[in-house]
Image (cartoon, rainbow, N blue to C red):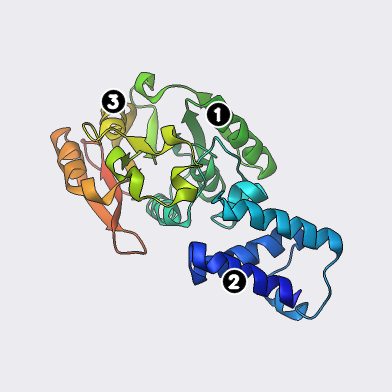
């Protein structure tokens, strides 16, 4: 096994960097053997079976082609849970976890009505369904393929979520029907495409990633307009955002009358999350 680990590191480090290569190595052995890092270290002197070596060689070949390891292994870790992923659905990212933390921390009330717009794999909706206090969660996406995977994730992770196939541009929730709206919509400018890593640019669904440079806040505007009617008085709107358009988004929300607008930085120091309240006051228990 020691030789296989060495080969993985030597092959992957020039392509992905040392830290990412180490993480990929751990993911591979966790997926194939269920091993933690400590178990990997304990078994380092053991001989791998020919079957295991063949499986690892196949994974390594695909990684050389910049295919995301999450697609290769068929799963991605998010908020302490393993989510099924496949080409056609955006890969959950740890950078989104602070957004879930924010929502859970700011909303301790029971029975909140929540909508996750552009749900993708369902990671935000499922994390909220499992961590809020008896919420009613609906998850919306226009991709049948993504929703199929999201439903499967919800069933496997025992999360009560109502899955709805709908184009966000046509989404018209009833007035006062929601306490929380959260969205991680497409937000990368087309002009940023060339600068992305190949494992993102060439593999993940473009429709879930990119917006035209001429209208980078397209989805935020649509969702904010819907939220101005659908949210209860003082209901909360949460977004994951593109840091380069953070101040533009603040202005958009201000123009629509949203209050208590906050922009929060991600673990890398970038403005990545926006929170605001629908006009009309707040909750005493917030």
Question: Which quarter of the picture shows residue 248?
Answer: top left
145 vs 68: above or below: above
Residue receiving disc 1: 163
Of pointers 3 and 2, the one earlier in the residue sequence? 2
Residue receiving disc 3: 229
Q: Secondary structure at mark 1?
A: strand
Q: Secondary structure at mark 2?
A: helix
Which residue occupies 61% across, 35% down? 149
Q: Position of residue 232 (x, y in %)?
A: 32, 32
Q: Quadrant of the N terminus?
A: bottom right
Side (left or right) of 1 relative to 203: right
Q: Which mark is residue 1?
A: none
CA distance for labels 3 and 2: 55 Å
Q: Which mark is residue 10?
A: 2
Q: Secondary structure at mark 3?
A: helix
Q: Position of residue 13 (x, y in %)?
A: 53, 68
């Amino acid at each position: 096994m020691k030789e296989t680990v060495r080969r993985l590191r030597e092959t992957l480090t020039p392509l992905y960097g040392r830290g990412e290569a180490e993480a990929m190595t751990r993911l591979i052995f966790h997926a194939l053997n269920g091993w933690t890092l400590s178990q990997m270290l304990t078994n380092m002197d053991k001989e791998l079976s020919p079957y295991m070596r063949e499986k690892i060689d196949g994974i390594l070949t695909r990684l050389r082609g910049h295919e995301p390891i999450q697609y290769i292994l068929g799963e991605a870790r998010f908020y302490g849970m393993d989510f099924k992923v496949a080409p056609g659905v955006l890969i959950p990212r740890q950078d989104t976890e602070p957004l879930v933390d924010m929502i859970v921390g700011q909303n301790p009330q029971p029975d909140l009505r929540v909508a996750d717009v552009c749900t993708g794999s369902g990671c935000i909706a499922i994390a909220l369904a499992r961590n809020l206090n008896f919420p009613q969660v609906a998850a919306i996406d226009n991709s049948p393929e993504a929703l199929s995977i999201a439903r499967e994730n919800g069933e496997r992770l025992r999360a009560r979520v109502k899955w709805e196939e709908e184009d966000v541009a046509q989404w018209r929730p009833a007035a006062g029907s929601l306490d929380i709206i959260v969205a991680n919509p497409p937000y990368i400018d087309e002009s940023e495409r060339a600068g992305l890593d190949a494992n993102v640019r060439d593999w993940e669904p473009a429709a879930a990633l990119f917006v035209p440079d001429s209208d980078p806040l397209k989805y935020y505007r649509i969702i904010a307009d819907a939220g101005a009617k659908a949210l209860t008085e003082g209901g909360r709107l949460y977004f994951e955002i593109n840091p380069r358009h953070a101040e533009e988004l603040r202005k958009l929300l201000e123009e629509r009358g949203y209050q208590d607008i906050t922009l929060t930085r991600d673990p890398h120091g970038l403005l990545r999350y926006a929170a605001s309240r629908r006009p009309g006051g707040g909750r005493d228990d917030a």
